[in-house]
Amino acid sequence: MTDAYGDELAVVTVTYSPGETLERFITTLSEATTRPVRVVLADNGSTDGAPEAAAATHEHVSLVPTGGNLGYGAGANRGVAELGREYGWVVVANPDLEWGPGSLDTLLEATERWPRAGAFGPLITERSGVVYPSAREVPSLGKGIGHGVLGKLWPTNPWTRAYQQSAADISERVAGWLSGSCLLLRRAAFDSVDGFDPRYFMYFEDVDLGERLGRAGWQNVYVPSARVMHIQGVSTAKASSAMLAAHHDSAYRYISDRHQGAQWAPVRAAVKAGLSVRLKLQSR
């Protein structure tokens, strides 16, 4: 562990024409913590004017154009790189998020209980109030295939339940990885693994980050006493077919990265073919 960073707090959100939800993100953030917080909008090429308006309206919000649509992980990395070394705590969160009162302070309190944790995740609900399974197990090949093939057809199958660690397990605990839609990161830990892998345009960048943090000796801690609400699909709904393709591409990258070498070539080929079929079926 390193003391190279200070104790100040920043929030980085990657924007891509986020619409009206961005203002709600910023206003509810003021109720999430009593600490001063800097907000960085890492903008991937918005055309709706929302990030520019937010930066002009709020003194603590700054706009950082990334130069193009870099994807979620690379955009987040760009936003974090904008911060000075006084910022030792960084939240990476989706802009279509509403913060529960005190939620960020609750996450920060958990850092005292878990000094070896590099990432902390709150309980995330959907707009309907349903709890999203945001603290999951690192997927083995078998569980990943079982969840991928049967997850939509048979949501309660044993592979999906094991992978998701069940949304019913609402307890503070160590998880394999935490949803990238809202993460409080110890910056020293984030830097120790070189942040998000920019090869993942969207999806699986959080799975990959959580696994690499674990391998580097850090913990990923689920803190359900902190609550946020994720309003799904504001930016991604505009290109759902493209997002489906990105999801399947990232799934293959994740699996193939972890099964290198000639001996795994048949498995990689089978996984690639299976994901291709799955994508065609879901795109219909």
Image (tube, grey):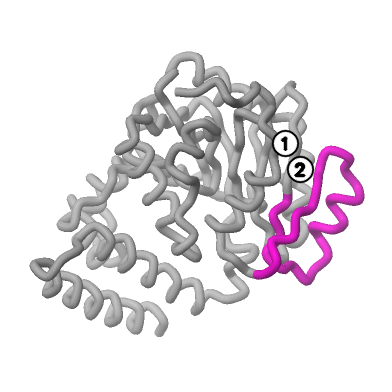
State the residue lying farthest toward the top.
112
Give the residue drawn at x 85%, y 50%.
Answer: 55
Residue 163 lies, in percent from the top left, at 26, 48
For the record, the magenta segment spans 41-68
**Looking at the figure, which quarter contains the C terminus?**
bottom left
Total marks shown come to 2
Looking at the rendering, which quadrant does residue 216 occupy?
top left
Residue 251 circle label: none
Q: In this image, 178 relative to 95: left or right?
A: left
Q: Residue at x 14, y 73 (%)?
A: 265
2 and 1 marks in contact (CB < 8 Å): yes
Q: Nearer the viewer, residue 102 or 247?
A: 247
- Report the amino acid beneath label 2: Ile
According to the picture, the residue beneath numbered tag 1 turns out to be 29
Q: Quarter of the image for the N terminus: give it.
A: top left
SS for callout 2? helix
Q: Quadrant of residue 283?
A: bottom left
Q: Is residue 47 magenta?
A: yes
Q: Amino acid at mark 1?
A: Leu
